[in-house]
Image: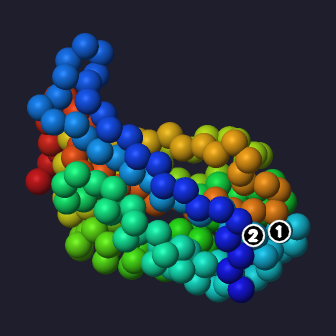
């Protein structure tokens, strides 16, 4: 059974880099849920419960996350931080097998693999959530990162699941595109 302690939606409006203002703000949004880790402190072979938890969190939060954007979502990413009584694989189980479907549904497609990051850490630790274009894996302009932290999460027996989207790439990209 999924036990959510807290959810949050964080929005960034990036308007300038150094002193150069962009043509328009780039809006980046993360939705996150802090859930109880049912497997904290013990090794369990079957992680299906966490697969389903990731899907449920995506279905719950992604519609609200998308509504925070000024324009249509163009890039996405996901991450998890596992509290210190859990293991890395618990985070992977939350974000890999089933979270992608509700994310793709909410952003209107998504042919590209959703970039991800997982780590084990204490309360307040930050994580870099990678972002990439939802359809074009070679769009270097959309390779980006959001750094996320919540002061009281994850507690040792929790997992923080994070979904990120943006309505544009970096504000002033100058790296070109990759091979086609």
* Residue farthest toward the right in the current orientation of the protein: 41
Question: Relative to residue 99, is residue 142 depicted above or below?
Answer: above
**Label 1: element kind:** loop
Q: Name the residue under label 1.
A: 40
Evaluate whether residue 137 shows in this view.
no
Residue 167 in the image: above or below residue 97: above
**Vertical side of 176 occupied by 44: above or below:** below
**Is residue 80 in view from this perspective?**
yes
Q: Where is residue 77 in the image (x, y as percent from the top left)?
A: 40, 57
Looking at the figure, which quarter contains the C terminus? bottom left
> Is the residue marked by circle 1 packed among few (<14), some (14-19), or many (20+) residues within 10 Å?
some
Mark closer to the observer (2, 1)? 2
The residue identified by callout 2 is 36
Contact, mark 2 vs mark 1 (Cβ under 8 Å): yes
User: In the figure, 148 relative to 85: above or below?
Assistant: above
Residue 35 figure quarter:
bottom right
Tell me the quadrant of the picture where the N terminus can be found.
Answer: bottom right
Q: Report the residue at 24% width, 59% height from top.
A: 73
Instruction: Report the residue at 30% width, 34% height from top.
Output: 14
Q: Quadrant of residue 101?
A: bottom left
Q: Percent x, y for residue 108?
A: 23, 72
* Residue 37 position within the rendered picture, expressed as x and y whole percent measured from the top left: 75, 70
Q: Residue at x 17, y 28 (%)?
A: 22
Q: What element carries label 2?
A: strand
């Amino acid at each position: 059974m999924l036990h959510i302690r807290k959810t949050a939606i964080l929005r960034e409006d990036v308007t300038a880099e150094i002193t150069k203002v962009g043509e328009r703000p780039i809006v980046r949004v993360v939705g996150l849920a802090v859930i109880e880790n049912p497997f904290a402190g013990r090794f369990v072979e079957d992680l299906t419960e966490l697969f389903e938890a990731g899907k449920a969190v995506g279905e719950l939060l992604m519609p609200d996350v998308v509504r925070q954007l000024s324009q249509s979502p163009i890039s996405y990413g996901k991450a998890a931080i596992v509290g210190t009584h859990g293991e890395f694989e618990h985070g992977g189980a939350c974000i890999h097998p089933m979270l992608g479907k509700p994310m793709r549904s909410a952003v209107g497609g998504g042919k590209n693999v959703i970039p991800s990051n997982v780590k084990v850490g204490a309360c307040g630790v930050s994580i870099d959530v990678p972002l990439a274009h939802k359809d074009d894996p070679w769009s270097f302009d959309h390779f980006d990162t959001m750094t996320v932290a919540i002061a009281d999460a994850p507690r040792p027996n929790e997992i923080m699941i994070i979904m990120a989207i943006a309505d544009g790439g970096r504000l002033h990209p100058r790296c070109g595109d990759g091979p086609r």
